[in-house]
Image: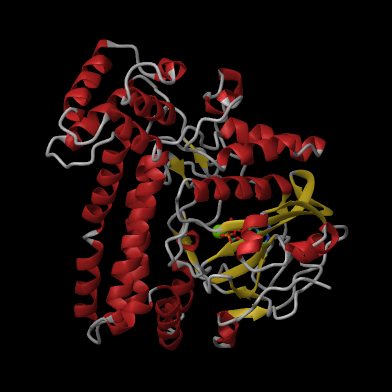
Amino acid sequence: MMPSFNFDNTYARLPERFGTRLNPTPVQSPRLIKLNRNLADQLGLDLDELDNKTAAALFSGNLVPEGAEPLAMAYAGHQFGNFVPQLGDGRAILLGEVIDRAGRRWDIQLKGSGQTPFSRRGDGRAALGPVLREYLISDAMHALGIPTTRALAAVTSGEPVFRETPLPGAVLTRVASSHIRIGTFQYFAMREDREAVKLLADYAIGRHYPDLKSAPNPYSALLTTVQERQASLIARWMHVGFIHGVMNTDNMTISGETIDYGPCAFMDQYNPDTVFSSIDDFGRYAFGNQPRIAQWNLARFAETLLPLLHDEQDSAIAIAVEIINRFSDIFDNFWLTGMRRKLGLAIEQQDDKQLIDSLLQLLQQHKADYTNVFRALSHIAEGPATEPALNDYLPQTPDFDNWLERWQTRLDQEPGSPAQRAEAMRQVNPAYIPRNHKVEQALSAAVQDEDFSKFEALLDVLNKPFTEQPGCRHYQEPPQPDERVYQTFCGT
Ligand SMILES: Nc1ncnc2c1ncn2[C@@H]1O[C@H](COP(=O)(O)OP(=O)(O)OP(=O)(O)O)[C@@H](O)[C@H]1O
Ligand SMILES: [Mg+2]
């Protein structure tokens, strides 16, 4: 017996031009590398019936489960600022939507599942390294409490993929509250297919924001809400030092979930100019640029909605501009709220922003480790020497000591005990992030030696990011000079 999902496919019922129906292309000899058993259970899969062989067949696309209606979704997108009218799932297949045990709806998608009409010159496949990277980092993001697509399974295909050299091929099963992107709207808007834009907007509202149906203008409400979700998301990225790396409009969701873990990475030393992606020559998607880029992308989203915002174009533009201009304030507010929390500040004071900015300036100046400094401060908030080794990461300079004193004085005005404050800080300042050099080490052991133990161990630690775990100190250490990764692999 094959365990099955409780499919209820609504996207497949949209008009034909929303995608192309086709099955995944089978692979030679699929092998299950990793299954997220908790997530599988949440999705209603009967794990007792799911042996490894069946799981490998299922999550490679060799076995299409009953109730699936596989399709490749159509979308367009601005890639590094240049508009591409047709992208679409060139190596992904949406199997369908599953209603989980709690009644929530999730897309189940295979990534690396073979060519589609959207493949252009691509092979439709994915290499094992990038598949494991997406698995690791999306799982880490989820554990950090950041909205994200999830990884349900990783399977090797038994077939090579060619990226300069032959690499082991793999398929990732991704779960998302939907795969609707800004680029999905752009696809229809650029074709002046107003009917489709309206259908898509109504569909997105119904699926993600049903309360907006009764708004005076549901479409301006959609724009406002998506903007809010994205502003909140990017602020959360900034709080943990996450750099997405390819914030193209086709990699930004309407749901507000992080999607597409291509050349992404976490920053070690604090510097807003940090870029890892080997294809981002101009630093367009540098750490500190992410809010601005999000706003730019949202403006592209707004353009697609213009005909729905108002019958008269000028009025429609005025509505859109008014909304998009609010982005900075909304973002700053999310950002500041989170940064206050990172410093244990529950009450709001005028000078807080200044206190935060001067800390960040010092971190940049002294090339301090972003994660470890905030974790060290979380312990210091409790009193001296709870985790003394972390103090080594604080700049040992008079200007930093001055800052510490200012912070202490500010903390004295806070309610609650130092122990409570420290605990609250530890809940938002992770001890563990997927440090790039650790990720690379795990991936190269997997790819070169078929040794998945480092991948498993790293995944395990990252699942409890807010709790120091015995024997895991090395996961907290920034890279040694010879371990530093300057560019993330982009031959996805
Ligand atoms: N190996 C490939 N074969 C075919 N198409 C590909 C391949 N790699 C990327 N593409 C396509 O190129 C476009 C942009 O790729 P990008 O790297 O943003 O997406 P991705 O990593 O494949 O997928 P996603 O955004 O779904 O995570 C998409 O249309 C994608 O389907
Ligand atoms: Mg993409």
Is residue 428 placed above or below 249 in the rendered structure?
Answer: above
Q: Which residue lies furthest to the right in this view?
A: 29
Residue at (56%, 40%) from the top-left corner?
462
Give how far across and how far down residue 138 sits, in percent.
56, 50
Camera-nearest residue between 403 and 241: 403
Q: Residue furthest left?
A: 350
Q: Quadrant of ligand 2?
A: bottom right
Give how far across and how far down residue 231 sits, in percent.
33, 55
Camera-nearest residue between 77 and 221: 221
Is residue 42 placed above or below 239 in the rendered structure?
Answer: below
Residue at (46%, 80%) from the top-left corner?
191
Toward which corner of the image does residue 175 lie, by quadrant? bottom right
Give how far across and how far down residue 458 sits, in percent.
63, 36
Is 85 left or right of 157, judged from the image as shown?
Answer: left
Camera-nearest residue between 114 and 176: 176
Give how far across and how far down residue 346 sits, in percent.
23, 41
